[in-house]
Image (spheres, coloured by chain):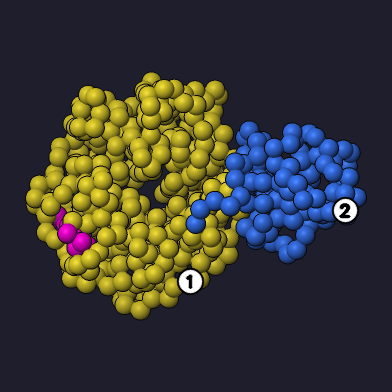
Amino acid sequence: MSSVRVLVGTRKGAFVLTSDGKRQAWDISAPYFPGWEIYHVKGSPADPNRLYASQSNGWFGQLIQRSDDGGATWEPVGNQFRYEGVPGTHQWYDGTPHPWEFARVWHLEPSLSDPDTVFAGVEDAALFRSTDGGQNWHELPGLRAHGTGSSWQPGAGGMCLHTIILDPSDAERLFVAISAAGVFRTDNAGETWRPVNRGLRSEGIPDPDAEVGHCVHRLAMHPSRPDVLYMQKHWDVMRSEDAGESWEEVSGDLPTDFGFAIDVHAHEPETIYVVPITSDSEHFPPDGRLRVFRSRAGGNEWEPLTKGLPQSHCYVNVLRDAMAVDSLDACGVYFGTTGGQVYASADAGDSWAPIVRDLPAVLSVEVQTLP
Amino acid sequence: MIRVVLPAHLRTLAQLEGEVELEVVGSLTQRSLIDALEARYAVLQGTIRDPVTQKRRAFVRFFACGDDLTHEPPDAPLPEAVVTGAEPFFVIGAMAGG
């Protein structure tokens, strides 16, 4: 029987939640790396027992941990993230030039085919790759050097490269998203990049239609349709049908189109999920009601999913990397909150139950569907 | 032998309990002490000093003999009591936030 392993990164450690395919009874691990911020944990699609974790804190910096046994044991690997060449500058909050400085790894994206190859999205925004299981990291400098890098500015959470999407149909094509710069695409395995933000409109920047400067919060893709991308922007839920060449807004009838997380159903490429958040100044659900919204039409028409979720006095946030789906039938959907709850739905969002209620603030949720 | 006391997170990373005893060849300074520490425990590379700039991390402090040596130059000699092992060298995580 299939099983599910949920990898949870929190402000104070990582947790592994496991269940059989029914997804009703869960085992919850003790914290791994207790006391450390775990921005992200993700498994290799090519070898589910190979996991990578980003471990950091404000005192002792960044470490990368690797497991070769599904999280039972871990070993630290390389933690040197050195920008290629002269790092140069980006814009600081006040508009002045600011040197590129490594702060932390936000996101780890293992290769679809090679367990030893993994990408890291970092703050200050850059993309790194390791081809030896995380021992050594090398920047793909074409991203920062393509021409707009000097104009990028950090969002409130820092200038982070937080989303990395690998095209399963074309190993040369990758998408990344940076707050607050936008979406960038390479068609030659990271050698050269270009912004793909046409159609995004952001009121908080001098030119609302600028080529870069958009605070993209998250991208999602269904592997069967790699030209279709979904985006939760600072404000606005967006869709592209041409691999980012153009975007259209699909916020439709959402109660608010601010939010962080977005994901796609494992078997229905037009079914997507978001968690609307009140506003950029009130990072909690509208009216204190935690609702996931599902669209079965690729956006515009949304239905609230509330069964099993708190519908009063709920003031948590769901961060950008904190939603994931499994590939069982029916599709399981999972998300974590800044209040430390991890909710799961074993019926594609129709009903929800907490797996665990009192973890530290959840930063990321990933799911592995195991045979 | 010199003695080094590490904060809990770094002891966990290095899988050790209690003090570290190190042999340092040549002049004992912050730099040579941390070089020796990192040579013994590779996992600590980058945790006390930035791995690229080699500068002390902002929230790391160095104490010895009742003094705060944090802002001493990295190549300044450490106190004789640390050199002889009479007193330990403390690596401290600065008090800061939850």
Q: Quadrant of residue B13?
A: bottom right
Q: Residue at x 30, y 63 (%)?
A: A334
Q: Residue at x 34, y 66 (%)?
A: A342
Give residue A8's position: percent from left, percent from top.
42, 61
Q: Is residue A86 above or below residue A234?
A: above
Give residue A32's position: percent from left, percent from top.
53, 64
| Residue under label 1 | A29
Q: Which residues are magenta?
A: A287-296
**Residue in front for this viewpoint, B7 or A130:** B7
In which chain is the residue bearing label 1?
A
Label 2 sits on what residue type? Answer: Gly
Q: Is residue A257 above or below residue A189?
A: below
Q: Residues within 10 Å of mark 1 (few under 14, many from 20)?
A: few
Same chain for the residues at labels 1 and 2, yes or no? no
The reply, left or right, for residue A42 in relation to residue B74 is left
Q: Quadrant of residue A41?
A: bottom left
Q: Residue at x 38, y 76 (%)?
A: A26
Q: Quadrant of residue A232?
A: top left
Q: What color was chain B assigned in the picture? A: blue
Give residue A80's position: percent from left, percent from top.
59, 40
- Distance from the alpha carbon under mark 1 to that under mark 2: 41 Å
| Residue under label 2 | B85
Quadrant in which the N terminus of chain A is drawn: bottom left
Q: Residue at x 75, y 63 (%)?
A: B18
Q: Residues within 10 Å of mark 2 (few under 14, many from 20)?
A: some
The reply, left or right, for residue A116 in relation to residue B36 is left
